[in-house]
Amino acid sequence: MTSLPTIVREMLCAKVNNPCIESCQVILAPSSLITDRLILRRPLLSDAAAIFEYACDPEVTRYMDWQTHTDIQDTVKFLESCTQRWKSGEEFCWVITTKPEDQVIGAIGCRLEGYMADFGYVLNRKFWGKGYATEAANAVVAWIMSLSKIYRVWATCDTKNFASARVLEKAGLLREGKLRYSMIRPNLSPIPRDTFIFAKIRDEI
Ligand SMILES: CC(C)(COP(=O)(O)OP(=O)(O)OC[C@H]1O[C@@H](n2cnc3c(N)ncnc32)[C@H](O)[C@@H]1OP(=O)(O)O)[C@@H](O)C(=O)NCCC(=O)NCCS
């Protein structure tokens, strides 16, 4: 895991919109999360080629809310925005890497807002069906739920994205409902599509 001084260097101060919490809360987002087979770590610019490999794959991006990358510069911009969003506290994004090679196979990100957090993930198609997304999701959900201010962690997926729905179930989230015509998947259609919403709450731990 990350040594304390590194965490302290990277800590950010996020104001929350919860009237019960008056003071500025400090959120320590770990630079890495370690599981049995994976290391989730902060992305580097040198990860661009590995990320582009899946971000340009229309099968991978089918249900994403961002457009398929067509040029590696799209990926570089994404990486730059990751750094910005981490610094501002808007979003924490980790690349998913396999041990011990440090091979980048995907990414997972979460956003904290007051007493809630949401997350999303993506994996290179070569690595689907091995339980990696569930392993990464479990690690991120565990970290989120270790934050005392968080009472609800949630995620959405297209109602036709069966693999993602299964990952969310396996990560311990319950399907709460369907939000009809709620999200545009730009790689599929400009017409909004139905989305499932899943969540795990603190009482369920
Ligand atoms: C969704 C995604 C991350 C899953 O990654 P993964 O590492 O293959 O997921 P896991 O292996 O941990 O689990 C997948 C589960 O879905 C199941 N699954 C896969 N395809 C399925 C399908 N068509 N119908 C039903 N279940 C399916 C698998 O059998 C497995 O469940 P099981 O362990 O009970 O057998 C990966 O497919 C992906 O990157 N997709 C494109 C990006 C994306 O859609 N991200 C999510 C946006 S909400």
Image (cartoon, rainbow, N blue to C red):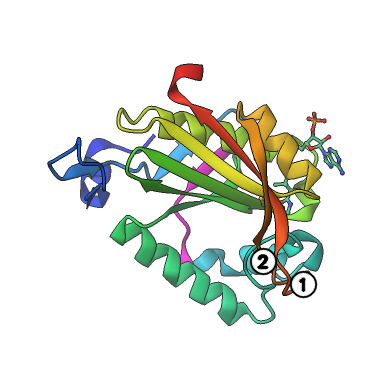
x then y, percent, for residue 155: 57, 43
Q: Residue at horizontal 72%, vertical 63%?
A: 61
Report the number of discs: 2
Q: Is residue 6 left or right of residue 49?
A: left
x then y, percent, for residue 142: 47, 29
**Disc 2 target residue:** 184
**Disc 1 target residue:** 189
* Quadrant of residue 138 within the rendered picture: top right
x then y, percent, for residue 182: 64, 58
Going by the numbered disc 1, the residue's amino acid type is: Ser
How many other residues sit within 10 Å of disc 2, few (<14), some (14-19) or many (≥20)? some
How many other residues sit within 10 Å of disc 1, few (<14), some (14-19) or many (≥20)? few
**What is the residue that sits farthest to the front in this orientation?**
180
| Above or below: residue 50 compared with residue 80 | above
Query: Is the shortest distance between ligand 1 and the CB of mark 2 under 8 Å?
Result: no
Are the residues flagged by discs 2 and 1 in contact, CB closer than 8 Å? yes
Q: Residue at horizontal 73%, vertical 60%?
A: 193
x then y, percent, for residue 125: 78, 54
Q: Which residues are magenta?
A: 38-45
The mark found on residue 154 in the picture is none
Q: Is residue 18 left or right of residue 198?
A: left
